[in-house]
Amino acid sequence: MKLLTHNLLSSHVRGVGPRGFPLRLQATEVRINPVEFNPEFVARMIPKVEWAALLEAADTVRTLPHARARPEWGGGRGRSHRRPGSLARVGMPRGDLGLCPQLHLVEVPKEPIEGYEHDEKFLRKMHHVLLEVDVLEGTLQCPESGRLFPISRGIPNMLLSDEETET
Amino acid sequence: MAAVPTDSGSRPAAGARFFCTAGRGLEPFLMREVRARLAATQVEYISGKVFFTTCSDLNMLKKLKSAERLFLLIKKQFPLNVSSVSKGKILSEIQRLINDDPESWLNAISTWKSLLELDAKKDKLFQRAANPPKRKVEENDIINAKKLKTEQLQELQESGECPLEKQTEEETQEQGDFFTEREKSQEAFQNDVVKAADAKNQSNLTFRVSCRCSGAIAKTFTAQIFIHLNDIYSVVGIPVFRVPLASRAYIKTAGLRSTIAWALASLAEIQAGAFVLDPMCGLGTILLEAAKEWPDVYYVGADVSDSQLLGAYDNLKAAGLKNKIELLQVSVIDLPLPSESVDVIISDIPFGKKFKLGEDIKSILQEMERVLHVGGAIVLLLSEEHHRRLKDGEQSSIPLNSEGSHTGEPSIKKCLKPGGKTGTSEAVSSSFEASSQECLDKTPPFGSLVPVECHKVSLGRTDAFICKYRKLHSLGL
């Protein structure tokens, strides 16, 4: 689950309404995926972003105590690669349970800056935060009702039980 | 109709004439696609086939998304005359179909070769193609064989009974052909076979032979010729690719047929930077087709089923699209998304015994409408039953005029069924666009969702409807 997706999800527990946003994110496994940078696409996403929610989510991911970083499925070679100008692909050997240094997210801008459409540095930071951080395992919590939704294999499960969906 | 051969081996300057087979109902989509993608001219269609001329090379031709298979046209002409069920007459008609105008054969073959020279490393072999057999070949088959050399046509002795059968149009699922490759042979063989059963004449058994070759005998042929004879036309062509266009290299496990998935996406007005949702994505076929065609878009697929989502995950991984498409496990009637947050919704609404929705189509549409932006489009594939239920909903909200009929008002839903007119090829230019009128002065059936257009398509054994809606205004919920 990308942080862009988290930014769009809202709890639909009955009676919660707009107080169901944003969902509180807890991640236990995160992966950093290199994604091809498309400045126009990022610029188009910026207006959709709820900044407070994004900052909160990025903070949670950044400061995870037991975060584990996994190599990209089918791509990891067990060695870190460093590419200039962007964060490295995570290449930790499996079984390493330590804090992954690559989870130091680039600082997330507090708000869109004037003329952001043409500011490549800004767009690259947003690109990284919104599209390259993938929460593989964790939970989302409804801030109003406390209901927990699990995230597994990067897919959040937000199905409500029959009782919960009754009006 | 004859293609212009070139010397240099580059693409034909004047364009070559092709035809594609297409699922019934997809012809308008394919016509629009060949015009847009290949700058095709002289575009016309008959039920199940679209004919066009283009200068494009194989790489562009390979990208066609709403076609089943692609053929180089050798000849297309009026149907064979079967007014007299006389063996001799029918035989000579068929002979004429094959033998007349050898130039058309030679031209097509040389275009075919020059197209492949740009591409292929090995020679392809000519071989007679099989039409999907309607019935099994009987014991007293006689196979008529002809040798077709590249320089001249020769006839062998033919025998057998061959009045033509009225062939029902069943073009949607093509059978596999039997291409084999061989390094050297230039010789082309053609088996000429047409037989059919005559219902009246039980004693005189007649039959049609379709010839499938595999193994050693298949290697003696250099390529395939495809022949389709019916009441409306006689068409002869050479398949251009080994594998049907409809079979996609990037889709591991197809749910919905890829051509229909692409057609749904093509109606949805997907723009760069849009948020596109498929709230009943199943194996993700629609999102895969859309993401391949419109890559700079944010795609989200949702489904309730664990197994479907696992399959979708696999598909995304196999296609290399995991970074483009996000997955959620949510229910379509309860989407955890804020109102008016989605730009486009595309979905194949499941139907049939396997599907246990429990909710009806109206609640699904209501929730879709809630999350959709004003002005956004919804494109759905609906079963006949779903379609009927929705239509009933619309009918009840239409004010009738004094005569108690709906005439005099622009129709809410025009259901196009291309191929309804038989007997002529026609260029369908206006009907596709004309159907996309919005009825702004009608009471919309679902909040503010207004039907825009509707197309009946064949899914093989059943039919379904591609329906597009637009959200006019917010309900202020």
Image: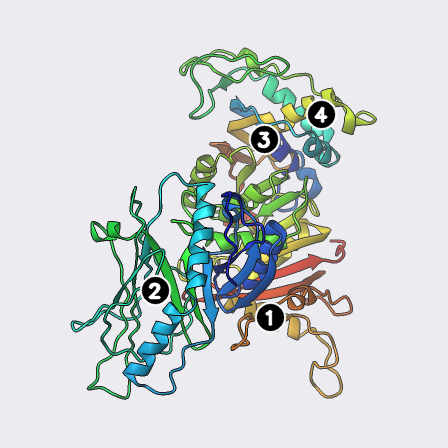
The residue located at (76%, 87%) in the rendering is B402
Q: Residue at x 23, y 76 (%)?
A: B160
Q: Are marks 1 and 4 on the same chain?
A: no
Of the two numbered discs 1 and 2 in the rendering, the one whose residue sits closer to the viewer: 2
Q: Is residue B424 left or right of residue B142?
A: right
| Residue at the spot of label 2 | B131
Q: Is residue B248 visible?
A: no
Alpha carbon distance from label 2 to label 4: 56 Å
Res B462 quadrant in image: bottom left
Crowding around mark 4 (Cα neighbors within 10 Å: few <14, some 14 to 19, many 20+) is many
- Look at label 2 and name its amino acid: Asn
Q: Secondary structure at mark 2?
A: loop
Label 4 chain ID? A
Q: Nearer the viewer, mark 3 or mark 4?
A: 4
**Residue identifier under label 3:** A2
Report the Cα–Cα distance between label 2 and label 3: 49 Å
Q: Which residue is mark 4?
A: A123
